[in-house]
Amino acid sequence: MQPTVLHDPAAFRARCEQHRRAGHRVGFVPTMGALHEGHLTLAREARRRVGPHGLVAVSIFVNPTQFGPNEDFSRYPRELDADVARCATAGVDVVFAPAADAMYPPGDQTRVRVPGVAEPFCGPFRPGHFEGVATVVTRLFALAGECVAVFGRKDYQQWRLLDRMARDLLLPVEVVGHATVREPDGLAMSSRNRYLSPDDRARARVVPEALTLAVNAWARGERSVEALRAMTEAHLRTRVDSLDYADLREPTDLGPLPAVLAHDDRAVLAVAARIGATRLIDNVVLGEEPAPISS
C-alpha cells in the first residue's frame, strides 16, 4: 500500500498522536532521502518493533544546516516520488517530507549541540555538521513525539550522538542503532555510493577490507590501539585518494582508550576516506561485530 505523504509538520504530529491515542506505538526513521536497501531495512526494523498495528513513519528532508560550504548539499539526490515507492515496499505508513522553511521557520535561532560525542572522528573535518544533525533531529523528535527511532550504525557517531541527545534532553524517544547493511563485497550501503565511478567503486572495497584486517587481528589477540589503527590506515592508503582518519574510541560516548585494551574490552574502529570526490565512512565495533567481509 502506498504511504501517505505529509508536508505539514502539524499534520505529521497529529497523525502520530492519533496512533498513540489508539494505543499503538510509533516507529520513526529520519532520512535525507535517496533511499536504498539500508534505509528500507531500518523501516522494517521499526515495523518489527511497533507491531502490525503501529505507525511506521519515514521523514525525507535534506537538512541544509548539516552541510558545510564546500559539501554536496546542492547535488545531494532528491527523488521523492521514487523514495515513496521504495517506502511502500517496506510497509511504511507515512512519509513526512517538509519544506526547509517548515523545519527552519523565519527568524529561527535555536541550535542543539552535543559537544563530547561530536568531537572525535568526523568532528574536526565537518565543523558544524553534528550541530545541524542534532538540531533537525530534535525538531523531528518534537513532531513525532513518543516513538522508537531507528538509525543505521554505518553512521555510528551520529547514532551515538542522537542517543546521548535524547537521553540528556529527556525526550520520550528510544533511539535504536541497527547493524550496517552492506553490499555483497562488504561496502557499506550509502546514498553517496552512487557518486562513485566504476573504477572508484572497485577501489572502494579497500574500506571494508581494512576493517576486516583489524577484526581478524583482534580475533588473534591484538589489543594495541596503535597497532590496530596503524594496520587499518596502512591498508586504506594503498587505494584511497585521501584519508581523514582511522581511529579507535570507546564505543558508547566515544571517549579515548588506553594504549592497550583488556581481552574483553570493546572498541569502535571508524574510518573516513575519499575515493575520487566521494567521502566514505565506515566502522566496526571490535569485540562485538563480525568482519565486514566474511572469509
Image (tube, rainbow, N blue to C red):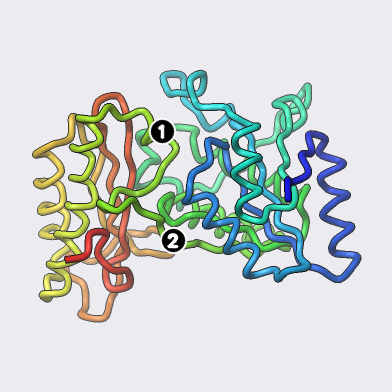
Write the residue at 71% across / 35% down: 97
Type of amino acid at the residue the image marks with label 1:
Arg
Q: Residue furthest bottom?
A: 264
Residue 226 left/right relative to 44: left
Q: Secondary structure at mark 2?
A: loop
**For mark 2, does the 10 Å Cα neighbourhood hold few (<14), some (14 to 19), or many (20 or more) residues?**
some
Q: Which residue is mark 2?
A: 253
Q: Where, by quadrant of the figure, is residue 7 drawn?
A: top right
Picture coordinates of residue 191 (x, y %)?
Answer: 44, 37
Picture coordinates of residue 16 (x, y %)?
Answer: 82, 54
Picture coordinates of residue 30 (x, y %)?
Answer: 62, 47
Return the mark for residue 126.
1
The answer to whether 46 is drawn above or below residue 276 in the figure is below
Quadrant housing the C terminus: bottom left
**For mark 1, does the 10 Å Cα neighbourhood hold few (<14), some (14 to 19), or many (20 or more) residues?**
some
The answer to whether 25 is drawn above or below residue 153 in the figure is below
Q: Residue furthest front?
A: 1
Q: Secondary structure at mark 1?
A: loop
Residue 99 left/right relative to 79: right
Residue closer to the observer: 237 or 164: 237
Write the residue at 78% across / 44% down: 4
Write the residue at 74% across / 61% down: 26
Type of amino acid at the residue the image marks with label 2:
Asp
Q: Where, by quadrant of the figure, is residue 223 drawn?
A: bottom left
The answer to whether 46 is drawn above or below residue 36 in the figure is below
Picture coordinates of residue 119 (x, y %)?
Answer: 41, 46
Q: CA distance from mark 1 to mark 2?
A: 19 Å
Write the residue at 48% across / 62% down: 178
Residue closer to the observer: 189 or 115: 189
Residue closer to the observer: 2 or 59: 2
